[in-house]
Image (cartoon, rainbow, N blue to C red):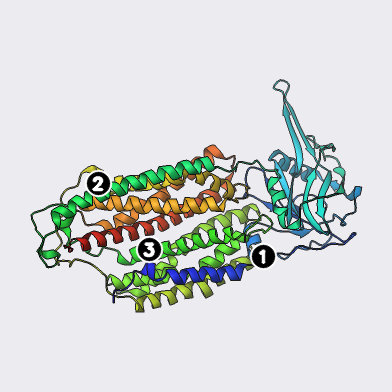
Amino acid sequence: MKPEAPFEKFAGGALGMCVLALCLLSQTEGAVKYKPGDQVTLYVNKVGPYHNPQETYHYYTLPVCRPKEVRHKAMSLGEVLDGDRMAESLYDIRFKENTERRTLCQLSLTEKEVEQLREAIEELYYFEFVLDEIPIWGFVGYMEESGFLPHSHKVGLWTHLDFNIEYNGDSVIFANVSVKDVKPVPLEEGAGAGGGLALTQSYTVRWFESPLPYERRAERLQDYSFFPKTLEIHWLSIINSLVLVVLLLGFVIIILMRVLKNDFARYNVDEEGACDDLDQGDNGWKIIHTDVFRFPPYKSLLCAVLGVGAQFLTLATGIIVMALLGMFNVHRHGAINSAAIVLYALTSCVSGYCSCNFYTQIHGQRWVWNIILTSSLFSAPLFLTWSVVNSVHWWSGSTQALPVSTVLLLLAVWALVGFPLTVIGGIVGKNKAGGFQAPCRTRNIARQIPPQPWYKHTTVHMAIGGFLPFSAISVELYYIFATVWGREHYTLYGILLCVFAILLSVGACISVALTYFLLSGEDYRWWWRSVLSTGSTGLFIFVYSVFYYRNRSSMSGLVQSVEFFGYSLLTAFVFSLMLGTVSFAASLTFIRYIYRSLKMD
């Protein structure tokens, strides 16, 4: 019986693993019911510069009204990873009860505290509160720059907040804060000197009935705009990319089919026998049939790349499917973070199986080392990057720095779930591996490779193979960056699935074309070349991330820069692994097909 390819063989198991993850992560989200006069808890969360989404600090790091004993809300893993640090506040909000100018507290600020507030306002600090899982945003203060000569620089602190809360029946639908009819307290240079600055903070609560049912309250938050909105339905751009991709794929397929048809007409012979009996006077891809399946160097590393790439393909598909099922909405803080961690741990068996299975097929002997390499190929760079980023956040006092308990939990997930599943998958893959299915035998002595023209060098193939898939996703990539490194809520998961399929299709098609051109030049070193050609898309994505940081965002500062470029490198690495795996699988399938076809009458 012909053994299945490791990528195809484990598809059913990987799909089942995603379904299991969906069941584990699905949570019933019910509306919190309130009676008139019930306490509606308002949690204070974090503050930070408006243009640096990942540079956040606890709200109580500022000199503001706070309870004598700060009590924090129990948070999920995703919320902690998202930098949330919710704590109870002094705001007394009662369901359906309006409140007019109630005093929150009186503050006596020192000169140092006034200066801290001034710096925060000048850096455009915003705050985030949470009421019934609804985020509420507002600015800490007000800054005005006017005139050149004379120059005017005014800084003021908002000491009164108006809370506008919408409800439907016994549920909260939406909430926001405004300072429209409020004058800021000026914080002039030298304020706070000689005894400090006395302030009185107050608030107003107004309730409004909303026709929107609780099940659709996420729509209300999506329509609200505190942060700049850049995401719009971009069907025209997607259709344009889709048309270009279809034309590209059609062009490549037609050309390859016509060329292969002519090749088969020249190469096929009317005699029985193996590939060794073919005419040796021809040139091109047929003449290297005894070398094309010669196993490459660094077999263990190649199989580890393919295994981890297969894992991330499964992980990405699972995340998109969960999003399409509506499991991620704007009211679930950090839900995608939690899902990604659980899916990464559960799909570790995919990487172990695919890597060790293929490693055994190509006669690899050190399977234990292969499993260890597979397990650490991504986790080691991830841990190194996270260590640097987390150290910078810890040094700056940011809430993005993970607490020790969360770090230990993540290590436990990897050590007790991820790594063991990698080992189990590797053992199963090794035991179920058959022989490598090669249509032609490989000779002991390698054929000499003729000199290649410049356009067939690895660098040129990487440039072509990386640019074309990148061009297919360049439009959608901006929206993804605006979501990850901004504050947008991405909701067009159907379009994302289409773009993901387009990316994989283009990568596979370009890989087949480049592999054919490589073999036509009598160069049989296609194994690593197929991985690198399309895998180089990750380099283009990282270059684009640099462009986005400098020209499409207003991010700045050490904290934001370290996190942005650190995780952008990891993102580029993940894309390289995924596309390299798809590229290799497509090339291997194509090569097996053309050399098997030579033996047909």
The residue drawn where x is 55% and y is 51% is 563
Nearest to the observer: residue 559 or residue 135: 135
Mark positioned earlier in the residue sequence (3 or 1): 1
* Closest to the observer, 86 or 209: 209
**Nearer-N-terminus badge (2/1):** 1
The disc labelled 3 sits on which kind of residue? Leu
Q: Quadrant of the C terminus?
A: bottom left
The reply to whether residue 380 is in sight is: no
Find disc 3 in the rendering and name its residue.
306
Residue assigned mark 2: 456
Rendered view: 146 above or below 335:
above
* Residue 497 visible in the shown view: yes
Pointers 2 and 3 in contact (C-beta within 8 Å): no
Residue 170 lies in quadrant:
bottom right
Indicate the amino acid at tag 2. Lys
Q: Position of residue 466 (x, y in %)?
A: 37, 47
Q: Position of residue 132 (x, y in %)?
A: 77, 58
Q: Amino acid at mark 1?
A: Ser
Measure the alpha-carbon separation of dots 2 and 3.
24 Å
Circle 2: is it few (<14), some (14-19), or many (20+) Cα within 10 Å?
some
| 5 sits left or right of 122 in the view | left
What's the distance in space between the residues labelled 3 and 1, CA to CA? 33 Å
Image x and y of residue 413, in percent:
55, 71
Q: SS at mark 2?
A: helix
Q: Residues within 10 Å of mark 1 (few under 14, many from 20)?
A: some
Q: Report which residue position mark 1 lands on.
A: 76
Q: In the image, which disc is placed on residue 559?
A: none
375 sits to left or right of 190: left
